[in-house]
Image (spheres, coloured by chain):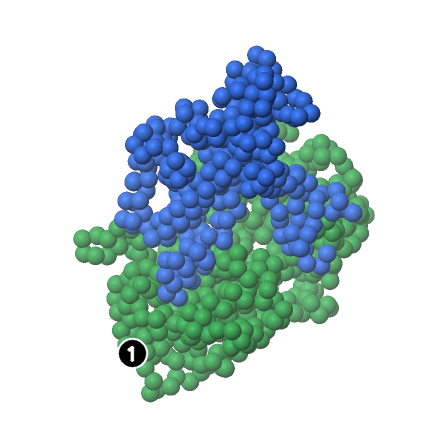
Chain colours: A green, B blue
Amino acid sequence: MTAPLVEIRDLKVDATTDAGRRIEIIKGVSFDVAEGEIVALIGESGSGKTTIALTLLGYARAGARISGGEVWLAGKNMAARSERERAVERGARVAYVPQSAAAAFNPAHTIMDQVIEVTRIHKLMPPEAARAKAIELFRALSLPAPPLIGDRYPHQVSGGQLQRLSAAMALIGDPKLVIFDEPTTALDVTTQIEVLRAFKAAMRQAGAAGVYVSHDLAVVAQIADRIVVLKDGRVQEIGDTRQILDAPKHPYTRELLDAFRPRARAAAAASARAAPVLAVESLSAGYGPPRADGTPSILIVKDVSFVIEPGRNLGVIGESGCGKSTLARAVAGLIRASGRMLLDGKPLAQHAAERSMQDLREIQMVFQSADTALNPAKSIRDILARPLEFYFALRGAALEARVDRLLDMIRLPRGLKHRRPTELSGGQKQRVNLARALAAEPKLILCDEITSALDSVVAAAIIELLKELQSELSLSYLFISHDLNTVRAICDEVAVMYAGEKVEQTTPEQVGAPGGHPYARLLMSSVPRLDPDWLDTLERDPALVEAFSKR
Amino acid sequence: MASLASGLAMGGYRINWVGALCLLIIVGWASVAVFAPWIAPHGVGDVVDSDYFGPMTREMPLGSDYLGRDMLSRILHGARYTVGVSLAAVVLACGTGVTLGMAAAVSGGWFDAALSRFLDALNSIPSKLFGLVVVAAVGSTIPVLILTLAVIYVPGSYRFARALAVNVNAMDFISVARLRGERLPYLIGAEILPNILGPVFADVGLRFVFVVLLLSGLSFLGLGVQPPNADWGALVRENIGGLPFGAPAVMAPSVAIASLTIAINLLIDNLPRKIRDRDA
């Protein structure tokens, strides 16, 4: 038996903090990758999965360094080479596919020039041969019009296509190993399938080995032969994909799998007597200067109506660009909309500036990214105290006590009060983001993709928290997400949006059922399952894909 | 011993050696400006040397100027004008400019458009010419100088702060504050200002240097600080005749201007940082 292509032995990476202290990020990791094998590195953010993948390129991010161990790639120790020697390997023997292809392509050059750049740098083949090879790769990655797509600029193709083009860029130098760094995380589920299929086919054709970094077990299940489960810079479990999915040994692996199957919510009974918390009638909203009839020139949300009963939750799902976030912003009053909105049976002004203090207090919005939703210059205490001072005029000890209670409510230690948002983890920030909304004692919370930026285990914990809070505080949620599993876990009803219109509203179990709207069916069938055969056996109605594919 | 290699750590903040040195120079000049009458060996207009452009001696460490006055005393007194007038002008200019800039970014609409066009128009007036007209009209007193210098530097500061604030204004936490029903003063004071403070300080430092130079220029034209008092720019100008003799009277005020302006700029590049690593 020949030696494996990659041998990582007792790898250690450490980083220097701003106080000059060294902390170990990777604490002695060892694993192999055989020729032609795809190994997935899976774990939550901060587990070190990308850091390990980058050491295969002989690279450590600024402030970090490989402090111990060996990284053998095809008989060469990348950890011990000089920068010049590593440069010879990069692109030719080991290649990298980044998370965001949109950020990785230079918008000023054509795609073809960038795809064949590697062959020029390493003098692998003449430009004509490289172009021919690139077109072949475009075909293997099932890109449209392979001979012509290279002449376009990066902004002229879709996100899914760009991600496949970055794979072509990686494969052109015939590398022995390709590193995929969360390449489908930023894509819609309907697009993700095409990209995964294309990656799988192209890798098989090229016979290259792969290291696939992801936090999504279901995606990894489709593409990887083996899975390495990481946490806190240590390997928790290594095993075949099937063994990890069907018979996980390590408790952390089981936790990851559990997070993927959220418990469904016990549906709340609609109270017949009370007026709905929010009733929206034929709401339309958009951007741009108003046209003659008063509607915005670019209409994002078209004629959407729904009702949210007290204590019940409505989920809104759809791909990016379908108008679900715009819907939330219109309800919140951030943008002008036409149509009627009733809060507790009373008319609600369209714009936040025209609403009464009580209306503003009763509808709170929680934004997707806690990084931009929390002012980085303020302490957690100041962030939580402001709504209390503002709405309830709390001062002094009463204020501090209420801030403490809010922190208890979201299960954060009180000691975090004096920290800044940047010193908290992603999950902690999202909890603070939620606590600020709770501080206003609202009736309705608009949750805009609040778990999308979080790891599955952390996201599952947030969903559990939302459910607990609901039973304690008699809240309703308008829960917007592109992830059907999350919506199912918390909502009583689900609305499916496509191109600005609500195409279906039904119970979570019924979404995508035969007889429903075709787009809902397509969306449902595109959600990856924890089954290694799912992608290969998946049959999607080509007519459906064609009809709802803007790409 | 990493802290010795990279600077001083104190009270949760760390400053590197360059920053600490510059801070020392600035604090030094500021105290000179405050205590000048007490530490200067001679009065500002006293002729104490029978010769002009005298060399460095034990009695006059920086020599004498073109009238035989003690150069050290002239520079110590001049610090009041260079540091004091410039500081007052720059605080006024940047205070107004940054406040208006943030208000324009948050309000948008006609307020933003009108204010921006008005300040652009003000910006198009050459600064020396503007100073000339104002001084000719109302005379050269210290308050007039400060106000004139401030007006000249408001538009630049406004533009700078507005550009920064527009970016912060697009963040979700501003939307959250608007949805809460917050008014303009809170939005600009509590939400935006803390996030643009770093670059704003850098801008204040740069503008301070510009003001020092403009003040020197006005003094050169005889429109700035009036004799027998003089700011450092005026000291360079009045002693320029000593250049062929290699008189210390030309070199000393130039070095003073350079040390202050360079120290300010280096300090801004090396401001103390808060130590984030709490376990250290």
**Residue displayed at 44% across by 36% down:** A152
Q: Looking at the image, can residue B66 be seen?
A: yes
Q: Position of residue A159 (x, y in %)?
A: 47, 48
**Residue displayed at 35% across by 74% down:** A358
Q: Position of residue A304 (x, y in %)?
A: 31, 66
Residue B87 placement, left or right of A282 = right
Position above or below: B125 against A475: above
Observer-nearest of B35 and B202 = B35
Q: Position of residue B79 (x, y in %)?
A: 54, 35
> Which residue is at the far bottom?
A273
Observer-nearest of A113 and B26 = B26
Name the quadrant containing residue B143: top left
**Residue displayed at 50% across by 58% down:** A375
Observer-nearest of A440 and A468 = A440
Q: Position of residue A165 (x, y in %)?
A: 52, 42
> Which residue is at the far top?
B244
- Identity, as a three-letter code, of the amino acid under mark 1: Gly
> Mark 1 sits on what residue?
A345
Task: Give the secondary structure at mark 1.
Answer: loop
At label 1, counting other C-alpha atoms closer than 10 Å, the crowd grade (few under 14, some 14-19, many 20 or more) is few
Q: Looking at the image, can residue A130 be seen?
A: no
Position above or below: B59 against B51: below
Residue A229 placement, left or right of A340 = right
- The chain to which mark 1 is attached is A
**Residue displayed at 52% across by 65% down:** A382
